[in-house]
Structures are given as C-alpha cells and as structure tokens.
Amino acid sequence: MKFFAYRRRISLYRIFTINLTFYMVIVLFWVVLLECPAAWAALEKSSKKECAMCHVMWLNVFRTEQETLIDWEPGNVLMKDTQGIVSAEEICYSCHDGYVLDSRHIAWKGNNHTTFKKLPENAKIPEPFTLSNTDEIYCGTCHTPHSEEAAAPEGDPDASVAGPNSFLRVSNTDSAMCEACHVNAADYKRTNGHPVHTDKLRIPDTLFETGSIPAEKKDSVICQTCHAVHGAKGRNLTVMDNRGSALCMVCHEQRSVTGTLHDLRLTMPEEINIKGERMSESGPCGACHVPHNAAGYKLWARKMPPGNPASGICLSCHKENTAADPGKENKAEIKGIGQYSHPNDVDIVSKSVLELAPTAITDKLPLYAKNGARQTEGTAKTVQCFTCHNMHQWDPVSPENKGGKDAIGDASTSFLRISAGLASMLCLECHRDKRQLLSYDHNLAVTAPEAENIQGRTAAVSGPCGACHIAHNAADKKLWARDPAPDSNDPADVSALQYCIGCHGENKMAKEKPVGENDHPVNVVSRGPQIPPADRVASMLPLYNEKGSTENGDRILCRTCHNPHIWTVGDEVISASGERKNIEGDARNSFLRKVASPAPDLCVVCHEDTALLTGTDHDLFVTAPSAKNQQNRNVTESGQCGVCHAVHNSPEKRLLWVGPYGPVAEDQHSMNGLCTGCHSKEGIAGDKIPPVAMHPPGQLISNIMWADTPFFGYIKLFDADWQEVNSGDLSCSSCHSFNQWNHRLAEQGPGENIEGNADTSFLRTSSDQAVCIDCHGQRAIWRYTYYHSLEKREMLKGLRPR
Amino acid sequence: MADMGRTRKKIIFAWIAGFLFLFLPAKNVFSMECVSSDVVRSITPPGVDQPSDLAIGAKGNIYLVDGVNNRVVVTSGEGALQFSFGKGGSGPGEFQYPLGIDIAKDGRVFIADTGNHRIQVFDAGGTFQYLFPVKTSDGEKPADPVDVLAIELKNYLYVADNDNHKIKVHQQDGTFEFEFGGFGEVRGRFRYPGILAVNEFNQIFVVDVLNTRIQKFDPFGNFIAEIGTWGVTPGGLFKPKGVAVDNTGRVFISDSFMGCVQAFTNLGGFIGVVCENGAKREFDTPVGMVFDAQNRMHVVEMRANRIRIVEVSE
C-alpha cells in the first residue's frame, strides 16, 4: 500500500509538474517569438565573417545560448524599405580609428554634415539617395559599401575616405553629389553664389592641407574646396574656421581688409549682414560678401537698393541722409560722400565725359557694368566706387599698412587704387589731359605748400588735384575743395568766378598773379556788334550760365580763356617735381585754352576782326618784333593783340591799353595817344607820322548816318573814355582802324612793311568817299593834303577850294 | 494505452524542454572565465583627442600619443601633466597624425609619425633627435607606420606598415634590416598589422586587425603562433587593436569594438576576460596597452580620451 500510495503521489506530482511545465513552455515560446520580432531576423540571418565585420549582429552566435562579449542589439534599422540591421557608427570607427584607415581627424573631429534631421519642406532628395525610415538624413543617405560606384578601385583595399569612392552612393567627383541635393542653396552662378567650376584663381596647396578636396582640374572651385562634409573645422562645414575670413583669404589673399577701417569687426562690430550675422561671426569678408544666397553679382552681403547698382554696397554705409530717405540711418560715421561727390554709375563711353579713349583707363582703374561686373570689353562701362577704390586695401602702395580702426585717410590711402597724393596719379589716370598741372604754378604742392583746402589739408596731403577738387564732400558741383566765396558772407554767392579769384587776388595765395581792376571783363554776357553769337563762341571756348555751368552758357568767365589744368596747349612735358615752379607766363601759355601768340588764336574767337591785323604793319612780328609794350613784353611774349592790350593788370583801364602811349596835344583827343605811342619821333613808327596837326576839336561831328549804312566804312567817334559815341571829335581812330590794312579787302596783310595809299593805310574807308567828303565835299582832298603835308601846304595855298 | 499516453507526454515534454533549452538560455547562469581587475586610476590629459598608444618612460612618466592633435602628451604616473611635444607639420619634430610609440631601454622615444611616413626619435624630454623614413619598395604604397617596437636584441626597431601589410625591421638608427609579412590571411601574413609588443623571449606580437588575431614571431620574423580567433564570445576577437605582455608572460589583447581586454597564455590559450565583479570590465574603445613595472595594465581608451590603469589578478 505504501508502495502504491507512493507511486500515486509520484504520478500526481508528475502530472502536475508536466502540465505546468507544458503550459509555461508554450506561453514562453510565444512570448519570445511574438514579442521580439527582431529575433526572427536573427533566425533568418547567417553571415560570413566579411559581412559580419560590419554587420556584427548578423552573427549566428547570437542565436545560440553562448555567452557573448557584446549584447545583441537588434534595433538600429535605419534604411527605408529594407530589413535587417544596419551597422552603427561604432562599427565604422572600429576600422577608421587609424588601424585600417585613419579618419579620426576627418569624421570624428570638428563638424559633420547634418544627420538625423528631417529635410526642409522645399528640399528633395534625388535618386539614388535615400532617407532613413523616419525620413531623416542619415549616414546611409550618402554612403553605402554596396554600390558599384562605391567600390574601391580594383586591387586597392584602401580606398581613401577622402577620395571619390568613400563608400559613397555615387561618385562625388567635383562635388557632383553635393550639387545634386544643394540646388536651392546656391545656383552656382555668380549672381548670388560663389562661382564654382571655374579656375580663374590658383588654389594654394595650403588649402588642401586643411581638408579641402581638389577637383579633377586642380584649381577648379568645387563645393569641397571650401566645405568638408566630415571633420569641418568651421561653421557651415567650412574646412577652416572662417569667422576671421581665413578661408576666404587663402585664395583672395590680396583682398584682406583685416585691420583696416573696412574690417567691420573693428569699426562696426554690432552691424549685421544679410544673414543676420554679426561681424564677429561673419568675419571681415562676410560683412560685405556671402558665398551663398547673396544679394547681387558681387555676392553682396547687404540688401541692395532697387536696380542693384554696383556701388550700392558702398553707399549702403557711405550714403548721406537725404530728404527722400530720411529714415535711413547713415552708417558712416563712417565717411559720407556728401552732397557733391564725383559722378558715380556714369557711363563714360556714351557720355564721352573724358578727353581720352575710355579703354585707356581700364589698365589701372577698372570700369564696370551696371551690375558690378568688371568690363574690359563692350560699351557699358561705368564708373563705380570700385573704379577708384579698392575696398580691400587701405594703402595702395603698402598693402601691409592697414591703417587701423582710427585711421584718417588722405589722398595716399583711403582704399584708393592708386595714390592720389603727391602726384595725384589716381585722378590723372583718367583726367590725363590735366597732367600738365603737375609741372606748373597750379600745382600747389610746389607753389603754395602751406595752403589748405576745405578739409584742412595741404596739397602735399591732398595731392595737387585735391588742392582744388575733392572727390567727396566737395563744396559744389565742380567738386571744389576751396571756400567758394571767401570774400562773401552770402552763402548763395557761389560764383564760378571764385574758383580763380579766390586765389588770384591781393593778399591771397596767388598775390603775385592777381587779377586787378584793369582786366578783361568777366561774368558778362558775351554779346555785342563785333562779338559772334554765343553758340558760335561756345563751340570754341566755353561760356557759362549764371550758375557756372556751360549748359546754355553765354557768359565769359575766367575759365572761358583759361584752362587751369593746362599751362601750354599741346605741351606734353609733364614733371611731377614741379621743376617749372612759378615761371613767368606769356601769351603762349599761362593756362590759356588757345594760344595768343604768335597767332592770336584765343583773341580772334570773340574778336574776329582782329585776325586781319596779321601780316599788316600793325603786326609787330612784321614791323617791330623787338618792341616792347608797357609791360615790357615784346610781340612774341604778348602776342599781336597783347602788344597794345593787356588782358590782366593793364596800366590803362580804357581798352586795357598796354601799348606805348604817345604825346597828345592839349586840345586833341586823348585816343590819339594810342597811335602816337608809335607814330611819333621816338616811336617805333616814327617814319609814319602825320606831319600836320589833327582835325580841330569841337566841331560836333556826328556819324549817325554812317552808322546806319553797313556797306561803307564809317568814321568812328569816341568819347573821353574811348567808348564809341555818335557825336564827338575826330581822333586817329575815327578814320583808321587798327587791324584792316585795306578796307576793301577783308584779308590779312602781306607780311611786309609796305607803303599805304588812300585805300589802304588802315583807313576805315577810302578817304575820298567818306572820311572827309561827308563834311567837306569836294574840298576834302584839298583839306586832307593841306593839313597832313607841310610840303604840299604851300603849294596848295594858291589852290584853295571853293 | 496508459503507457502510450505517458510516452506521448514524455515526447512532448522533451520537445518543449528542447525549445526551452534552445531559446531561453540565461546568459548569467553560466559564469564567464574572468581575470579579475581593479581600477587604480584614470588619467584624462586635457585637450587630448582620440589618443591611440602609450609608453612608460624610465621615470615612470606616461607618454601618450595624441595623434589627432599631432603631439605627444607626457604625464606623471599619477596623471599630472608634465609636458607635451610636437605640432602639425612635416618638419623635424612635427607630426601628421601619429599613432604609435615605444621607448627604448636607453630612454629614446620612438614615434610612428604615420602621416609623414617616417619614424621620429626624441629624448625623454621630448627634444627631437633624428628621424628616418620607413623603407618602402617599388610598387608599395607610401609607408603607413602605425606602431613601433624597440628591442634590445640587435637594436631592432619593428615598424608596423599598415597599408603595406608588413612589419619592417630597422636598426634603431634607421638602417633598414629586413621585413616580413604581406597581404593575406594565412599565417605569417597580415591584413592591416597594428600594434606591436614583445615578451621576455624577444618574441614579437603583432595585432593582425582584420584577420582578427595576434601573430607571434621570433625576432627575425619567423612565425611561431597565432593567438585568438574570430568571434564575439570569450576568447574571440572582433576588432583587436592592442597587445601587451605582462611580467608573467600573459598576453593581453584589447578589442576596441567589444570594449574589452582578454588574457591569453603565451601559447594562445584563453585565460579569461578582464572582469569587474565577475563580468566583463567595460573599456571605451581600448587600443594601445602597456604594463608598468608594477605589472599594472595601462589601457588607452580612444574615444573616452583617457588612460585607464588597472591591476589584474595573476
């Protein structure tokens, strides 16, 4: 019984334990298989060593009870539409730690391409790239060891991670893979993104040492020239930390603004660029340029005004406040360009503002298209700020001179492309016709070195041109650099005259060459019976309007006759040393627009009739070349006209007479002295002296009738001021002109001293027609002979006319 | 009938028990073969980035190769920073991502200047002494020295030329002597030889990274034995990186992926995993190793940027 009872207990026990175990096993079996689906994968997978080198979780051992040194992690399934376990970063590192390939400094140092982030809404990933199962970028987006293109070259087990393979899904030669996705960030045209696939500049080898990848064509710029997908040292995956623009300057070394006023980190650290970056982030280059999504052709980093003019980037800081733009803050505490500034955005080709071929100035001073493209060909060549300024170099001569944040610029610095100091070569590069200025009196660096312009700068600092003109913040439209009205408290008294008389006056800078009271009239309308129409004059000499502009000008100003920049017309001699300091000028030079000697080219523009004097007896080149006038000048020095008339500082106000003034009888007309200066015993025309007294005064002679008769010469009457009148006494000049030898022939003289007769001899008309007959009728000849010839007087006494 | 029912139940029980045995192995049920250890200290020199190898100088200073920063950092045995030397470049005393180091008995410090394809030699104070290029033959790639090993025998200097899959033996003055190895999986050949070590018998141990083994050679390059096999179970190697021999002749091998160090006999027999409380002691990407005079194991943990000093039981 005990035995059976024992067996029964055993049986019950066995039945109980077997059933319990059975149910537990069934439950656990399904728990394992249903709750751990990845276990199915492990069940299905088996792998060889080479696969498991990366796909370690595929190893069979994880499907056994064997103890392993690492845990089975069935997760980390990243790739969409696939099953299985993709290797993790640690697997990559286990070979790329230097003991198969060293990628530590590339992939595990610095910044790497964004991963495990969703794409922007407007971005798309093209084939064959893929996203993770959560639509994020992951390593597998770009990399796979399984594509044909990703395979290392045959026989080379060490495909470089930096090379064209690198387990990439497609070849990234010349950054083609980068561009496949980043089509929106930059269109890779120069309009808003740094140019690529161009080899305009040489890429220094030092850049490649930083992780930059060379293109197939070594100096061609590609994405990876500046960016490293892995191990980037700078923000935005740049191969270098570019906060100080070091990356930019590897290639653009000559454009370093570091340490200059244009290094906005120093001067405007709080300023932000178009990307909202402060200067400390953007670096000195980033203040004005950004490589992607820029505002214009030059990769501008600032918002540009409508039309996107090239100089807009400069004016965004250097612009003056204007009424039209009152809210805009002038960033240039900073130098504004002022109300009057050198013309900008001007097409110098179409406007022909320069007296030279425009192409001639592109060697040193570039011209630009409206959008800022440098123009070497074509017609759309405009002057922009960059024409004169190189914004990247403070000192054109010494690039190492950065100036610093407190620098005060002058004509030798100020980011100019060529120094405008000393020789003003910057200005004269374009304004070449004014180069003579350097050698003569108007180079104030030589003649008035102490004189200061309105900026308080001497010519040595401002340059010879800068003594009178400044490109920015000038006093008026002519870019005048001197007080435009030094003798006036009326600010409206801005006369173009002042340009000259501001210096050429008593107690002024050019007191040695003052303009006095007895000068040729200026600031007067050019008109009169003997003066050609203004438009005809203006075709040869500039006339000015009341504002000093040549537009519809009809006034004579100093600048009508003088070009203050050219001492001698046609003289090419240029000397920066000013060797000709303060030489005495004459009618052949003296900044005259046209010479007045030997030919009176200048005078005859307005005084056309004076041209007839040439070659006559009154042309002292013919009759008395060594004779000197009251200013002690001979005809060569004074010119044919200047022998008798001094345009400036004449001793005689009337007719600006400077010729010798001869004896005049007390009852005779004072104008006769103009003739007797020569036609007297001591005069150079002593052999041409009317031997008998002049016409008696006080005869109330009138010439009105004659004045209305244009076909004949007529006698002229003059008052005591030598002004023409219609009633008065006869003088020599009543009958004689000074210039026309033969009143019948309006031509120049023969060039030799010939004897005159009743038709010539400078008579205004034949003596038998008008001069005497008008009053004396048939007795005119008798009277003329009686009063002009002592020899014939006695003979004529018996032939007294009726 | 009753017997048949019992038999059926036995079969079913056996079937279920089999599944249980197959699918529910409790890993902790079986004890791992361990070599117990205690951490003495950890040293984290400032600024170090992914260090690879280390050596101990005559004064007990630790020389750590901070290759990504192109320098060698020297600390005291206690971890106090002493000095560093080297900078990026290709001139004397300049490095390009060096990986390996060894210190000769006379105190000279040999650096495998990997990226510059050469060996540089310094005195104990880090002053540059001389350099020489690693010998390469026609058809070979530029030398890729990842480790050096200086032994007293014949003043040999062994250089692991990783990319050429060879060990290149020079005199310590740079004179080339001979080479052995080559690409392959058979004994005596390598797939990416890495860190080197030597035992008291001047036997040379070479980590054969992608062949997942350590190969042992006599000083003249003749194959003696291989240690370790492919696998992720105890005694197996997945990504072996470091090798060091303690003063009892045990061979310790680090595995950077599995994060462990395992001990083997000089003949290749598995001794155990370096453990902590009966379980694998976790190292963060262990690579270069060395034993000091007190037989303490120094392990470079590459991604943790530190040195772990561990006492291992005998």
Image: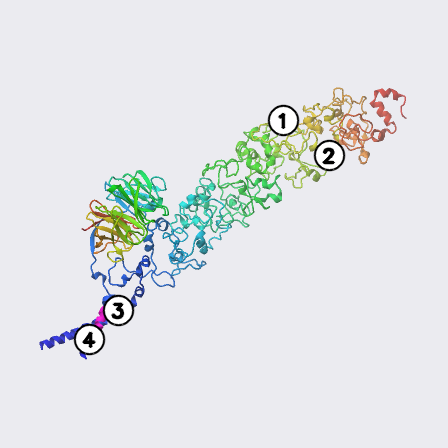
The answer to whether dots 4 and 3 both sit on one chain is: no
Q: Nearer the viewer, mark 3 or mark 1?
A: 3
> Can you identify the residue that label 1 sits on?
A584
Contact check, label 4 and label 1, Cβ < 8 Å: no
Q: CA distance from mark 3 to mark 2?
A: 126 Å
> Can you identify the residue that label 2 sits on?
A608
Residue A319: tell me if it is visible.
yes
Residue type at the position of mark 4: Thr
Mark 3, chain letter? A
Q: CA distance from mark 4 to mark 3?
A: 22 Å
Q: Residue at x 63, y 26 (%)?
A: A584
Residue B7, which numbered label? 4
> Can you identify the residue that label 3 sits on?
A29
Colouring scheme applied when the structure was drawn: rainbow
Examine the structure image and report whether residue B298 is included in the region drawn in magenta: no
Q: Nearer the viewer, mark 3 or mark 2?
A: 3
Q: Which of the 4 image quarters holds residue A490?
A: top right
> Which one is nearer the viewer's eye here, A742 or A763?
A742
Q: Residues within 10 Å of mark 1 (few under 14, many from 20)?
A: few
Give the SS element for disc 1.
loop
The answer to whether dots 3 and 1 both sit on one chain is: yes
Q: Main secondary structure of the magenta part?
A: helix
Q: Which of the 4 image quarters holds residue B177?
A: top left
Which stretch appears magenta?
A: B4-19
